[in-house]
């Protein structure tokens, strides 16, 4: 009985994962799927992250970026909480501006990731954006 429930739950997870990670019927690369899941979590839980304009009142070009948490440990810097802010701050401003509407943000982000097809996070961070 428990095995059947586990299989049913796994089938739902696989189905949800496939729906989440496809664009026009094509599968995104693994790192692009990782970026997608990080940023969708960030949009859904935006209350846990602070914007630079909330930290200081100086009008800078990075005022709409997320404020990265202070950390000296590389283990923490390689974790998902720190990575989310870094990945979000590296997004083009047109996509960042859509973060208040989840559906529009998700659509624009999927198209961006599909167009660029990142296979590593270094490719994502070094991508020249238009």
Image (cartoon, rainbow, N blue to C red):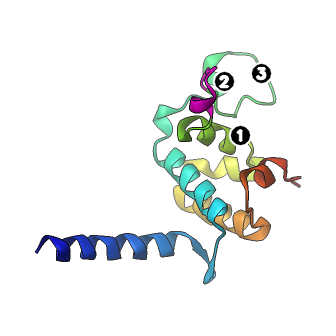
Q: Where is residue 14 drawn, in percent x and y?
A: 41, 73
Q: Nearer the viewer, residue 82 or 20?
A: 82
Q: Residue at x 34, y 77 (%)?
A: 11
Report the mark closest to the observer, 3 or 1.
1
Q: Residues within 10 Å of mark 1 (few under 14, many from 20)?
A: some
Q: Residue furthest bottom?
A: 25
**Lower position in the chain sequence, tag 3 or tag 2:** 2
| In the image, residue 109 above or below residue 54 | below
User: In the image, which disc is placed on residue 59?
Assistant: 3
Q: Which corner quadrant holds the N terminus? A: bottom left
Q: Which residue is disc 2 drawn over?
A: 53
Q: Secondary structure at mark 1?
A: helix
The answer to whether any part of residue 101 appears in the image is: no
Q: Secondary structure at mark 2?
A: helix
Q: Secondary structure at mark 3?
A: loop
Q: Nearer the viewer, residue 38 or 75?
A: 75
Q: Residue at x 89, y 52 (%)?
A: 128
**Lower position in the chain sequence, tag 2 or tag 1:** 2
Q: Where is residue 48 drawn, in percent x and y?
A: 47, 33
| In the image, residue 107 above or below residue 26 | above
Q: Residue furthest left?
A: 1
Whether residue 72 sits left or right of residue 118 in the image: it is left
Cα separation, mark 2 vs mark 1, equals: 14 Å
Read off the magenta span. Answer: 69-77
Q: Residues within 10 Å of mark 2 (few under 14, many from 20)?
A: some
Q: Which residue is disc 1 drawn over?
A: 89
Whether residue 119 sits left or right of residue 78 in the image: it is right
When asked about the image quadrant of residue 76, the answer is: top right
Q: Nearer the viewer, residue 94 or 77?
A: 77
């Amino acid at each position: 009985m428990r095995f059947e429930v586990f299989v049913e739950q796994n089938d739902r997870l696989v189905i949800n994962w496939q729906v989440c990670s496809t664009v026009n019927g094509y599968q995104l690369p693994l790192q692009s799927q990782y970026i997608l899941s990080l940023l969708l979590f960030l949009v859904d839980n935006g209350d846990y992250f602070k914007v630079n304009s909330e930290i200081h009142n100086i009008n800078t070009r990075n005022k709409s970026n997320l404020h990265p948490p202070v950390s000296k440990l590389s283990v923490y810097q390689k974790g998902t909480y720190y990575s989310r802010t870094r990945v979000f701050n590296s997004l083009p401003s047109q996509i960042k501006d859509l973060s208040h509407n989840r559906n529009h943000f998700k659509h624009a982000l999927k198209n961006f990731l599909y167009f660029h097809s990142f296979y590593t996070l270094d490719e994502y961070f070094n991508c020249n954006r238009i």
